[in-house]
Image (cartoon, grey):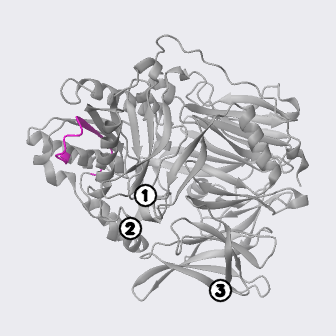
Amino acid sequence: MLAAAAALSIVAVAPATVVLAQTPTPPPASAWAREAAMASVTLSPDGQHMAAIISPDGRQRAIAIWDLNNLNAEPFLVGTDARSEFIGVQFVKNDRLFVRTQQLSEYNPFSGSPEQTYRYRTQMIDMEGNAIRTPQWDGLNERQQAYVGFGQLLSTLPQDPTDILVQGPRGDVYRLNTSTGAVSRAERGSDRFQSVVADLNGEIRGREEFILEGGQAYFGIQLKDPTTGQWAEHFRWSARDREPVSIVGFTNDPNTVLIQSTQGRDHAAIYEYNISTRQMGEPAFAHPFFDATGVIRSRDPAHYGEILGFSYGAERGRVYWLDSNLEQAEATLRAALGVQTESISWVDIASGQRGRFTTGDGADIEITSWSNDLSEMVVVKSGPSQPPEYYLIQNGRARLLGRAYPEMDLSALGETHLIQYAARDGLMIPAFLTTPNPAIFGNGPYPTIVTPHGGPWARDDLDWDSTGWTQYFASRGYAVLQPQYRGSEGWGQRLWRAGDSEWGGRMQDDKDDGVRYLIERGIADPNRVAMHGYSYGGYAAMVAAVRPNGLYQCAVAGAGPSSLNDIRQDTYNNRFIREFQHPHLNGMSPIDHISEISIPIYLYTGDRDTRVEPAESERLDAALRNAGKPVTLRILPDMEHTGNTWTPANIEAVLTSVESYLRTECGPGGL
């Protein structure tokens, strides 16, 4: 099968070699603040064209479209207006691109209320950048039509030459003609159902129903019988139990569906499920340490729908290839693109089982797009010390297409490794540790920044950090610890659930225990430690200022909630979240502990933030000033909460202000 991949022989264009100078200059904040020079690279199904989002000047984004038969020619460019920017592009047919944009909006046409935030829409263009006519959705006025665009993409329908499957604004599913923009309803939507899933032929055969029964909230997973066409509920999971079940795909056998489930497991597995007999088979894919996340299929007409591999969430997103040719191609590409590996010793958090797995050392590769016959591929090489590089694999050769941050000097960057340490109660905590380049800063101990991720139901990955919160500071001599504290998702149910009602409690212990771990090993200087977090991480930094443990010289809190009251109220207002998250959101509110704060704290937030409003930081600032405590507050102009909306000016302001604060105002004499 897929012999083209098996015959792959890579002659790589060698990445630029950086010769270490005597004293490399750390990359400036502007190196992270620029828009990525290349992103979202996608191939047409027939392998004749390629598109990407580019930003040569680091300010304005455009879509570039290449003819792969004449790759040396200049690409065709498609631009936007000053208020709008491209955030994603994808081939849906050989000559059609599905495009996602975001733009600043002062008006929501559905709510009728003004708001300072961003809105998103989908569009479609041809190879000359011409817009395909936007569908006319029933019951929408002109403003609402523009807001919705083409709706949500459900399936590219690889076997249909013109049609794709989209979901419109009322939940209805339509076949959309990519040449004319005409739509025909394929499935009527309902407020009862969500998360609809199409089978390999484009028929909607899976959906979720939100159910209130016996005073509890559930999701019922419904499947359509391939013989009778009748819908029936096959699975039900409760918000209280928090063991989700979801459909990850259908198979070529219309009676077999692939189900992801954590029920009875610490790590999610993918199962084959027989609709007629209602029997779940043995796991089609399960990893001993990590969650199975999805399935990858062939679009080649000769092998359409065959499973090529399964994805899973390890130290970063990975693929277990069932197809031996793709497995060999990935190994060949790693060698050709100079990827070094390291073996990680691992203790499973739930079972205590010990094992080893291999990761990329500083960088790894991912096959992100390919033609149907796999004769062309796009490969991204990236890692904690390697900004994304994009390669085209064509005719057995790897050609460097571009770098996301071409001006960045990598010689001053640090090294990042996945580690584990034991918390005080014995629970194993994963973490990513970035240490400065020893040729520049010696072997430590180093001034250290603990950087907890937001969420808290989220996680970090062993990949490039576009925020700069790791490498920007590592290039200036700091060690940076990213603890995957209890309450983090993506590391198994045991670690996730261990964070229940532990805000400011054991969740915080995990961060402090990481500091002690680094001090014991001579990595962290015990007199030069700070915490810098954003969103939930900002809350954690506020708590670090409260705790009387003497570990931190200062705290830096970005857009953190100083009180849990508003968050608890928000989670109560949603009927599902009221059972899924609200009962587990308990702990300390930093604003109730002003008298206990004994270290300087820097608060920053954006004036457009509607997720964690600036008032959260302003109230803490006022209380600290009234108590005579050292505090600095900065409200950053035109800044939203989520990073994908940040302007280059936002990113640069965060990095430089945090650096300045740590250097001059953190504890006695600065960090």
SS label for mark 3? strand
Mark number for residue 457? Answer: 1
Q: Position of residue 340 (x, y in %)?
A: 64, 34
Residue pictured at 46% horizontal, 72% vertical: 242
Q: Over which residues does the magenta segment extend?
A: 546-561
Location of the N terminus (image quadrant): bottom right
Instruction: Between residue 294 and residue 97, name the one nearer to us.
Output: 294
Location of the C terminus (image quadrant): top left
**Three-letter code, disc 3:** Ala
Sequence-first disc among 3 and 2:
3
Q: Position of residue 469 (x, y in %)?
A: 42, 35
The Cα atoms of the two marked residues, 2 and 1, are separated by 10 Å
The Cα atoms of the two marked residues, 3 and 1, are separated by 32 Å
Can see residue 555? yes
**Would you identify the image quadrant in which residue 393 lies?**
top right
Magenta stretch containing residue 560, yes or no?
yes
Residue occupied by mark 2: 581
Magenta stretch containing residue 513, yes or no?
no
Mark number for residue 399? Answer: none
The Cα atoms of the two marked residues, 3 and 2, are separated by 28 Å
Residue pictured at 61% horizontal, 31% vertical: 404
Q: Are marks 2 and 1 in contact (CB under 8 Å)?
A: yes
Can see residue 188? no
**Three-letter code, disc 1:** Trp
Q: Are marks 3 and 1 in contact (CB under 8 Å)?
A: no
Residue pictured at 44% horizontal, 28% vertical: 472
Position of residue 404 in the picture relative to residue 516 (left or right)? right
**Three-letter code, disc 2:** Gln
Q: Nearer the viewer, mark 3 or mark 1?
A: 1
Sequence-first disc among 2 and 1:
1
SS label for mark 2? loop
Vertical position of residue 483 compared to residue 161: above or below = above
